[in-house]
Amino acid sequence: MEESFCYVVFRLFGIGLSAMILFNIKRNHSNKRKARNYFRLLVLCLVLLVVNLIGYFFVDASGKALMAVGVVFKGLYLALLAVISVYMVMYAYNFLDIEIRNRNRTLKKILEDIICLIPSAAFIIIAYLDKTQTVTIAIILLYMVALYNDNQNELISLDPLTRLNNRNELTGYLWYKLSTPMRGRICVLMMDMNRFKGINDTYGHVEGDQALIAVASCLKKACGGVSGRPFIARYGGDEFIVVMETESDLDAEHLCDYIHMTLAVENHRLKKPYNLSISIGWVRNEQNNRSIKKLLRRADIELYEKKRQFKERERTA
């Protein structure tokens, strides 16, 4: 009797927890692609828990009709378990960000993919071995809470418009990087959109938001091919910052050129009545500097000079 009580209470707890997370994800994250995929996974897990709980009451049923119902619920549970396993693998592969330090890109990619798939593979093995499915459901609930925590962190660390890191996340990242002996490798690229006020004044703030999103997308594309995964953040308004690690100043110069080239390609693709362009000022951190404020001030001075040069070119053109 006590075992049956614990069995039912645990599953009711799981149903309540899943419903609560489902409500919060729907309310706070409904416009995000990652959350939409997680939402589907949550719904499947909630149905799985309900099916498992109902099926439990038909395990020791007598009578062919009741036994047939028990078999149906057991089959439905196994089918849902299989679908959830596939969804877990897909979610981990698409959204879990794992980085391994390895110069061999092919080996690095293979290892990162394998690590993403380990939890899902372990879940499938445990689900097969677990006769009562209690451990399996406990793992599912832990997995749901972990993914929910990941989605909640996005609200704190990401800019809601551009989906780039926000200013708080940038400060934390720089604080960590400047506290290491490798701080002399840090380069900060500070960027400001050209003629952004004109876009807002002429075409409206909605179009201005679309311009910011397009620039953010170009920054992701340009930085995607750079080793070490440069850190990209929206600093505020139409200002962006990229933090990269390199020993060569040429790498920073090449990234600036690649960003400009990516924006030019985007302008050709979008065919907007205005052109997207940015000014970039970049600096390398001094080895003895641990101050974020000092580093950003130097980058801001460089950016101001680039903006001045851009306006000068416009006047003389």
Image (spheres, rainbow, N blue to C red):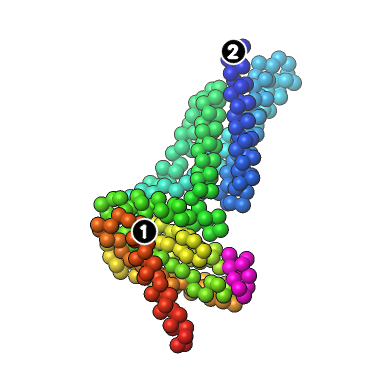
Q: Which residue is mark 2?
A: 2
Q: Tag 1 or tag 2, which sits nearer the N-term?
A: 2
Residue farthest right in this picture: 65
Tell me the CA gap for discs 2 and 1.
61 Å
**Residue lying at 41% horizontally and 79% vertically, measured from the top left:** 309
Q: Position of residue 113 (x, y in %)?
A: 43, 47
Specify start and end residues of the magenta stretch as a single range.
200-210
Residue matched to label 1 = 293
Q: Amino acid at mark 1?
A: Lys
Q: Is 100 rendered above or below residue 187?
A: above
Q: Please determine whether, in this image, residue 7 is positioned above or below residue 259.
A: above
In this rendering, the answer to whether 149 lies above or below 231 is: above
Q: Residue at x 51, y 48 (%)?
A: 156
- Residue type beneath disc 2: Glu
Magenta-drawn stretch contains 3: no
Question: Looking at the image, which residue is at 31% across and 64% down?
Answer: 284
User: Which quadrant of the structure image shows residue 12?
Assistant: top right
Number of numbered discs overlaid on the protein picture: 2
Q: Is residue 242 visible to us here?
A: yes
Determine the residue positioned at 62% across, 49% down: 30
Q: Is residue 85 left or right of residue 66?
A: left
Q: Secondary structure at mark 2?
A: helix
Q: Is residue 71 visible?
A: no
Identify whether 88 is placed above or below 160: above
- Circle 1 packing at 10 Å, graded few (<14), some (14-19), many (20+), is few
The one nearer the camera, 153 or 143, is 153
- Which SS type dominates the magenta stretch? helix
Residue that extends furthest to the bottom in the rendered view of this protein: 316
Residue 84 position, x and y percent, is: 57, 38
Q: Badge 2, how many Cα within 10 Å: few under 14, some, many 20+?
A: few
The percent coordinates of residue 15 (x first, y second) are 63, 30
